[in-house]
Image: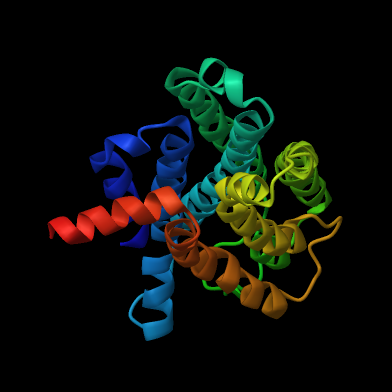
Amino acid sequence: MGNTFVIVLVRTHPRLHTPMYFLLCNLSFLEIWYTTAFVPKAIGVMLGTSQTISFPGCILQLYFIFSLGSSECLLLAVMAYDRYLAICHPLRYSTLMNITFSAQLALGAWLCGFLEISVLAALISRLSFCGPNVINHFFCDIDSWIALSCADTSLVERATFIVSINILLGSCVIILVSYIYIISTILRIPSAQGRQKAFSTCSAHLTVVTLWYGSTIFLYVKPSAQNSLDLNKIVNVFNTIVTPMLNPFIYTLRNKEVKRALEKAIRRM
């Protein structure tokens, strides 16, 4: 509901029809499907009404959850690049970043996320399972598949590590470099009011990035999948439920333009 509200708010207010808010709509749309991919099944598991899942269903759930999560990493990197252009090259921003280019970047983030995870899904589907078939998780996680397999899982673990490096650390480097330039540019602004105004345009994105990457890197950037599955479940709750729920509030409460649009919408109602 929160992410749908952000999409409707941006779509109905012409002042928000800019590349920055187009990318925000993409992020909100992505997170709707990200939570939809596992929350209904997780609720069924916790209530005891749907505690089994088929092999193809488990593979599909894994594929969509990790494809959408990878796309979110890349989309956050695109949003960081957008903020870099807006703050470091304000006079050329409308030329460098228009709706068409932002749409191409968003499409690239979606495609790369889904293509990268297709390799992992194909490798996992070829594993052999001859022992217990109880997944120690509330969704089909990669580590849970590896723990149940009775075959050699070293190739899957290496592939998971390489994909994690490509997606997570690759996008993280883009974000870090963008913010290094952003912060250095903001510090050169002479007035305190100007610095505050410039930083306010990227503070919401920086908050979301910190929440998302803090938990995601802990979960997936590791050479082995033998970490505690119980600890992974706790971090996954934060990563897959808490963060997507908080993001609409972060962008609504920390962004002045969105707050003004929200106030106008409330006054109309």
Q: Is residue 237 above or below residue 262?
A: below
**In screen coordinates, is 11 left or right of 227?**
left
The residue drawn where x is 76% and y is 37% is 185
Position of residue 211 measured from the top left corner of the image (x, y, whole percent) = 64, 63
Picture quadrant where residue 215 is located: bottom right
Left or right, 97 with reference to 25: right
Q: Residue placed farthest to the bottom in the image?
A: 47
x and y percentages locating residue 115 in the rendered image:
59, 32
Q: Residue furthest right?
A: 223
The N terminus sits in image quarter? bottom left
Relative to 162, residue 133 above or below: below
Q: Judge whether residue 4 can be spotted in this image.
A: no
- Residue 120, how many percent across, how many down? 66, 43
Look at the picture and state if 91 lies above or below 146: above
Can residue 32 be seen in the rendering of this structure?
Answer: yes
Task: Look at the image and tell me in which quarter the C terminus lies.
Answer: bottom left
In the image, 155 versus 162, the foreground residue is 162
Q: As displayed, is residue 47 above or below residue 137? A: below
The residue at 54%/26% (across/down) is 105
Q: Position of residue 252 (x, y in %)?
A: 42, 58
> On the picture, is 120 further left or further right than 140?
right
> In the image, 261: left or right of 136?
left
Q: Among all residues in the image, which is located at the extreme left? A: 269
